Amino acid sequence: MPFANFAGAQTNAGARVYPSGAKVALSIAGDLYATLEPRFQRTLNPQTIEMAQTGTPMIGSTQSQGCFRRQVFVTQGFIDLLNHIAHAKAIDEVEPGYFREYVSELALSGDESAPPAPRRLDDPKYWTDSIMNKQASLFNQMVSMTVAVNLSHHYLDHYAKYASQMPGGKIEPINNFIDAKEWEASVRCATENSLDCALATEGAKTLFDCIDQMSRRPAWAAYIVPPSVNIKKLDHELWRYEHDFFHGAPQQGRPALGG
């Protein structure tokens, strides 16, 4: 699949464009890389994200054949999805019930097609400065957590362990293979990495809660969380990791490579 970088994420609402697009995601990924310890940086390509122009939401750890290119693969559809979830949550603060309505629409979306944008998104009242500031904050936090988790799959050796199980070298959800302890280690590493970049966990909780509230999880949900994860427990763990980070508790999520 050819790769390309994109400056922004288009909405399905007229000519409006989110300021929080792929360019922002690339910048956040660069910050995540810069704050990692050198021993972890050595396992990664400094250009941490490869972008692909497809509407299907996908994110995953990847490595190009025959060269040292351990990166995170992200599709434009994934950027669009995060923008829409963040926007729906921001609107919900002034119009309660809007977020749950959008979650229901996402649960009905197809597995291979691009998820729908929230309804009535062309209404100017949903694009006020206060709503869009909240939207951008949530988007940044969602990008940080999801990219940081996939970076951790490289330096914690999860990708090396499971890559051979992904058919034909395709980008498959590694969450279908990792065990509970590996997932927990990745989440803790990603949380600490994100907090090092001054990006808190509210956006990640919003994203995880969106998936938890779905009556049916589309296939793209597996790129974000393992199917069996207890999301209410995950939310509590995120709170605990953030509490420990700001209260000086030892950071235990970054073990030595290989064990």
Image (cartoon, rainbow, N blue to C red):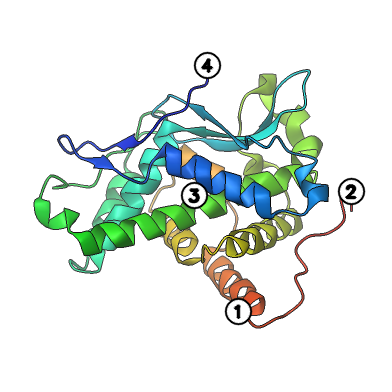
Name the residue that disc number 2 marks: 258
Quarter of the image for residue 246 reads bottom right
As shown in the figure, which amino acid type bears the numbered disc 1? His
Q: Is 139 or 106 nearer to us in this picture?
A: 139
Q: Amino acid at mark 4?
A: Pro
The x and y percentages for residue 254 are 78, 60
Q: Which residue is mark 1?
A: 243
Query: Would you say the residues marked 2 and 3 are in contact, meaning their CB atoms lie under 8 Å apart?
Result: no
Residues at marks 2 and 1, CA–CA distance in whole angstroms: 28 Å
In the displayed structure, does residue 22 sit left or right of residue 254?
A: left
Left or right placement of residue 126 versus residue 32 in this view: left
| Picture residue at 66% right of the left edge, 50% below the top | 34
Mark 3 secondary-structure assignment: helix
Nearer-the-camera pick, 216 or 164? 164
Residue located beneath label 3 in the image: 143
Front tag of 2 and 3: 3
